Structure formats: structure tokens, C-alpha cells
Image (tube, rainbow, N blue to C red):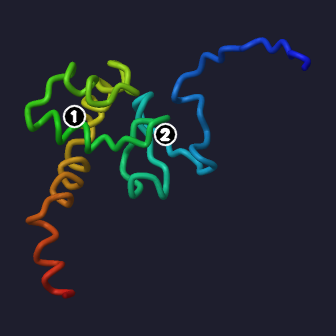
Amino acid sequence: MREKNRTMQTHAYTATSLSRYHGRPIEHSDHPHVGKVQGVGSGEPIILGTGIMVRTIIEQYQLGSSIDELLWDYPILSPAQVYDALAYYHDHQAEMDRLLEEATYEYWQPIITRIT
């Protein structure tokens, strides 16, 4: 059996250098770790390279999770990604508050009642 020597190359990249996510184009934001990808997270802002919705981080943070707890819950995330998600919320608060409202039971319950 022949062994092949392969040199592992590490590629340093930033989230803004990515142009596609699972074959889909990325709509970059003014935040390096946040973007939107049609069909991923319902088109909501996500943390690039993870598919984790910014809304998810904001919801947990507003419920009292600390940055350290968020990093524990999402070990794939770096501190920079979590802080960038929080910064995105503050810079796009009207959009994010609308998404947070639309994700509640109180928002969807009357709609579900009407269609059932």
C-alpha cells in the first residue's frame, strides 16, 4: 500500500471573502460576519459560514444568556461572530425587531387559527 504525502494548506479567509454559501449567492452586509442567503434561515440575516440566524443569538441574549453562554451553546462560533451579530442587531434594530416579533407564538397564532 502506497502512502501519499499531502501537505495540508490552511487558508486564511474572512467571511467577506466568501461569495457563495452552499452554492447560493451571499448578500453581504455592512458587518463582516453577517449576511443573507436566499433559502437559508428563511432569508434572514445569518452568521456567515454557520447558517445560524442572527435572530437566534439575539433571542437568547435578550432572554439573559451571556456571551460566554452563547459561545458554550454554539461552539462553532467565535467571540467576534457573536459580538458582530449583536452589533448587527443594534445597527438594524427595526428590521431585527420585526423578525423577532414575527417569530413569536402571539404573531402566528391568529394566522394559524384563520387557516385551520
Q: Quadrant of the C terminus?
A: bottom left
Label tally: 2
**Circle 2 Cα neighbour tier, 10 Å, few/some/many (<14 / 14–19 / ≥20):** some
> Residue sitting at 25 percent across and 50 percent down?
95
Q: Is 81 on the left or on the right of 12, as rendered?
A: left
Residue closest to the eye, 87 or 82: 82
Mark 2 falls on what kind of element? strand
Would you place residue 42 above or below residue 26 in this image? below
**Circle 1 Cα neighbour tier, 10 Å, few/some/many (<14 / 14–19 / ≥20):** few
Q: Which amino acid does label 2 sit on?
A: His
Residue 50 picture quarter: top left
Task: Say whether disc 2 or disc 1 marks the residue closer to the N-terminus.
Answer: 2
Find the distance from the CA under tag 2 to the CA under tag 1.
Answer: 17 Å
Give the image location of residue 34, x and y in percent: 41, 35
> Residue sitting at 66 percent across and 14 percent down?
10
Residue 112 picture quarter: bottom left
Q: Which amino acid does label 1 sit on?
A: His
Per the rendering, the mark at residue 110 is none
Residue underneath mark 2 = 28
Give the image location of residue 59, x and y in percent: 17, 42
Would you place residue 3 above or below residue 23 in this image? above
Residue closest to the eye, 116 or 45: 116
Would you place residue 80 above or below residue 17 in this image? above
Residue 71 picture quarter: top left
Q: Is 57 on the left or on the right of 44, as rendered?
A: left
Residue underneath mark 1 = 90
Residue closest to the eye, 71 or 53: 71
